Amino acid sequence: MTDYEIHELMTCRVAAEVDEQGVTVMGSFTPLAYAAYMLAKLTHAKGAYLAGFDAVGMAPVQLSFTGAEAAAYKGAACRWGMLTEVNSIHLANHGGVEAVSSAQFDGSGAINLSAIGPFDKPKVRLPGGAGAAEVIKMYRKMVAYFGNHNSRTLVEKVQFTTGTRWKVGAAARTEAGLQPGPVVVVTNLAVLVKDEDDEPFRIESVHPGVDPQTVVENTGFEVRVPDDVPTTAEPTARQLDLLRNRIDPFGTVKFDFVSGKDRLAYLKGVLDAEWERATAVAS
Amino acid sequence: MSESKMPDKVAPLEILGELVHDGDSVAFGGGWFANHPMAAVRELIRAGRRDIHAITVVGSVDMDLLAAAGALGHLSFSMVTMEAFGLAPNVRKAVESGTLPFTEYTGLGLLIGLEAQGRGVPYLPYRGPFGSDIPARYPGIYATSTCPFTGEELTAVRALQPDVAIVHALRADAEGNAQWDGTSGPDVEMAKAARKVIVTCEEVVDRDVIVRNAHMTKLPGYYVEAVIEAPFGAHPTSHIPRYAMDAWELMDYAGAAAGPSFAEYVEQVRGESEEGYRARVLKGRDSVLTSLVDAAEVIEGAEA
């Protein structure tokens, strides 16, 4: 067994949700989701249709802070703009997998990317959801991922609902004209799944070395623990090779797992490497 | 028979101070760290514009710098983020202290409001952000609409008409025909919705160049009032395929914004010409920013 880090296991688990049905659009600054989509496209879902920035039908690209946008256009079949994407992918029910991360997430499938505290004069003003409010509702699969599984993030009820899955169960979604599909939560401890509106999330699997009780204690909403909880699949050597050497050699995914005071130094290190490569290309 | 002359809309950057008035609503193009009309943002600050009602879909350093300079009277947005560099510190401070009134749209709602205006209808319906707390906060923007044919309940978004849209293109000609190659984001919808459209561009070219690449023209000249040449006009955000985002300048910005000397940073921008800004900030970094575009890799031939 190859040693791996937790963000690599999470990337592989999110990648497992990516298939060849529909279009998957890259959200705003979600490196782990980007890496997962690329991994899927290089392994089990070569026909996955990806859109990043205004590049639609992307080839898999190497991740970097400064180069991912340019790379997206190099291998794409089509160049649109935001509104065409909205009308042709999101609203036309062609959306495949939406991976989001948010400041708060609750047991109904709601996200908060707006405000902690009063909306008009918040304690913390968050960035806002961009298209997430509509997209997590409309896409076939909603995947929420969190690098730090705790009850401050996975809360009983979000303080403000920026967006929500709205209907969860397959029958309710089909009746509402939405594509049926699951809500999957991937964290550093476990994978949680919700299939029906009136049933709580259940633990689908726990990561190696994690006890189901730890998951329950660190989750602010009700979690059902099945009698038999399997262990999340570990990354294979081939997945790790692709992630480390082809998809994310600069380590952009890990950036989100670096704690507050070390983040700036880590970012500087990544940018130094990107600079070095660019100047090598120029000379 | 009198001969009419082709319009020449080319103007210097300094004209922004005349075209944009205090209190105007201004839609700023670009999205993420891509393609924001930053030269125009800096020029509005130099011109001392105040009380601007800025409209952005996914804003970043553009909105944060305007907030820092005290140029904003209102902010309409669906997201403002400095991504890896954190939450936009000056926007955040202004909202949390209650000094900056704001309207938070859902991302699709904002684009559809612009689309409605561009089409000349008072609203457009869509399968909206059901369950979101945002629509109920803004009954003047979001409403429920019933399909006259099926009875289905939809979300209606009121048309949104900015006084001005400012977008940054790759190139444009003197008539205002403007082309994008990479990210265009919300630029076209903003331009079609606005009363007045200002195009800044990396270069002003002859009409021949536009015609030879007509498939890249996303905005025909009849929409456009002024064309302004602004090389590196999106800096420190990107303009693909010319240059990548300047993460190093953004890091300096984020560092300065967190410290006590940030007022000096803003004053420096306010006190120099755009040419002076380029000379000071780029310092030869322009070739690296271009090389970053070349260095970006598509992953080829990963066998199963």
Image: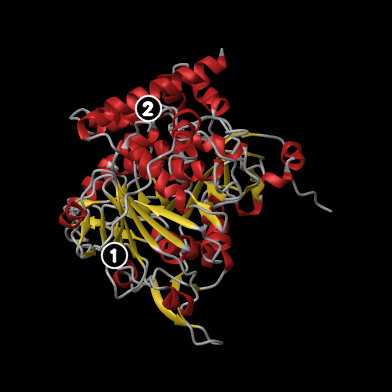
The answer for which chain carries disc 1 is: A
Residue A4 left/right relative to B226: left
Residue ID at (54%, 66%): A93
Q: Is residue A87 above or below residue B3?
A: below
Q: Nearer the viewer, residue A174 or B105?
A: A174
Percent coordinates x, y for residue B178 in the rendering: 63, 44
Badge 1 amino acid: Phe
> The C terminus of chain B lies in which quarter of the figure?
top right
Q: Nearer the viewer, mark 2 or mark 1?
A: 1
Neighbor class of circle 1 (other Cα within 10 Å; few <14, some 14-19, many 20+) is many
Percent coordinates x, y for residue B220 in the rendering: 66, 51
Neighbor class of circle 2 (other Cα within 10 Å; few <14, some 14-19, many 20+) is some
Badge 2 amino acid: Glu
Disc 1 secondary structure class: strand
* Colouring chosen for the image of the structure: secondary structure
Q: Residue furthest front?
A: A228
- Disc 2 designates what residue? B249
- Disc 1 designates what residue? A201
Percent coordinates x, y for residue B60 in the rendering: 37, 43
- Kindly indicate the quadrant of the structure image that contains residue A30: top left
Residue A229 left/right relative to B203: left
> How many numbered discs?
2
Disc 2 secondary structure class: helix
Q: Is residue B151 visible?
A: yes
Residue ID at (15%, 55%): A217
- Kindly indicate the quadrant of the structure image that contains residue B139: bottom left
Q: Nearer the viewer, residue A202 or B23?
A: A202
Residue B6 left/right relative to B120: right
